[in-house]
Amino acid sequence: MARTLIQAPASARKGEVVELRVTIAHPMETGYRPGADGRVLPRDIIRRFSCRYNGEVVFSADLFPAIAANPYLSFHLLAGDSGTLEFEWQGDNGFAQVERRTLQVT
Amino acid sequence: AFAFNRAAFEAKSVADAVKAYGGGAPVESKDVTLTAPDIAENGAVVPMAVASTLPNLKHLLVMVEKNPNSLVAKFDVSDAVEANFSTRAKMGQTSDVYAVAITKDNKAFFTKKEVKVTLGGCGG
């Protein structure tokens, strides 16, 4: 499991726009860079990030080799109902990780 | 395990990438904003933010023209999020950075900004 850092508020008012910031530890090897032995290192990147809010995909992004190592994303979500936020990363070599946070809406 | 858009992945130019996501010829627009530094001392981590006030958005793309694959990220916009995203990108050399907004009726709007990358990573 890769280490993740998720900045999400625990509670929000209904209709409030909350900022969500996520990073995940990942080398994001581009596939263009030679390694110590002079051979090009194979590509190993995270291809897709998605965020589900109560089961519905509210935000997703396709990531390409030009994303810096330890991919950082921030986006703004409109708080609707209380529920879970599910963050999912998928990548090369079968990389997959899901993290969950609950959001209390008052 | 999951589908991805090969044409977009292999796109070398801005126009190709926009076409791969179904957008028409991109038009320069003030309703798309791109926030990036004028000078990036370290090309491995360049913060970039895109935002747009256009209605009916489908995708926001970030592209670095002179990278081997020009696409950096594609963000999908939904009604529950604001069209305001930020991330960090790699840049191989000084290049124009493009932010492209594609609307649901497949119109494309862009804005661009040149980011200078200092080689050597020591600010020289």
Image: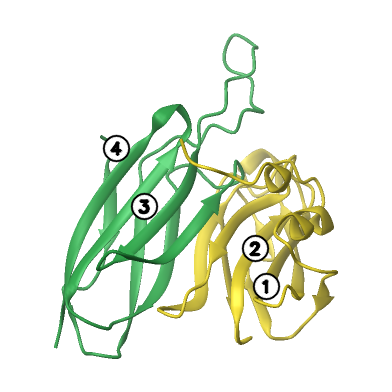
Chain colours: A green, B yellow
Q: Mark 1 = which residue? A: B101
Residue kind at label 2, given as amino acid type = Leu
> Disc 2 and disc 4: Cα gap in Å?
26 Å
Q: Nearer the viewer, mark 2 or mark 3?
A: 2
Vertical side of B70 occupied by B56: above or below:
below
- Looking at the image, which is closer to me, A30 or A95? A95
CA distance for labels 2 and 3: 19 Å
Q: Amino acid at mark 4?
A: Ala
Image position, residue B15 (x, y; %): 83, 59
**How far apart in space, not on screen, are marks 1 and 2 (Cα)?**
6 Å
Residue count near mark 2 (Cα–Cα under 10 Å), binned few <14, some 14–19, many ≥20: many
Q: Residue at x 44, y 59 (%)?
A: A73
Q: Are marks 2 and 3 on the same chain?
A: no
Outermost residue toward the top? A37
Q: Position of residue A44 (x, y in %)?
A: 51, 30
Residue behind mark 3 = A23
Amino acid type assigned to the residue bearing label 1 in the image: Ala
Disc number placed over residue A65 in the picture, else none: none
- Which amino acid lies under the numbered mark 3 shown in the image of this protein? Thr
Whether residue B36 can be seen here: no
* Whole-number angstrom distance, CA of label 1 to CA of label 3: 24 Å
How crowded pointer 4 is (Cα within 10 Å; few <14, some 14-19, many 20+) is rated as few
Local SS, label 4:
loop
Distance, label 4 to label 1, CA atoms, is 32 Å
Marks 4 and 3 on same chain = yes
**Front disc: 2 or 4:** 2
Residue with the mark numbered 4 = A2
Chain ID at mark 2: B
What residue is pinned by disc 2? B61
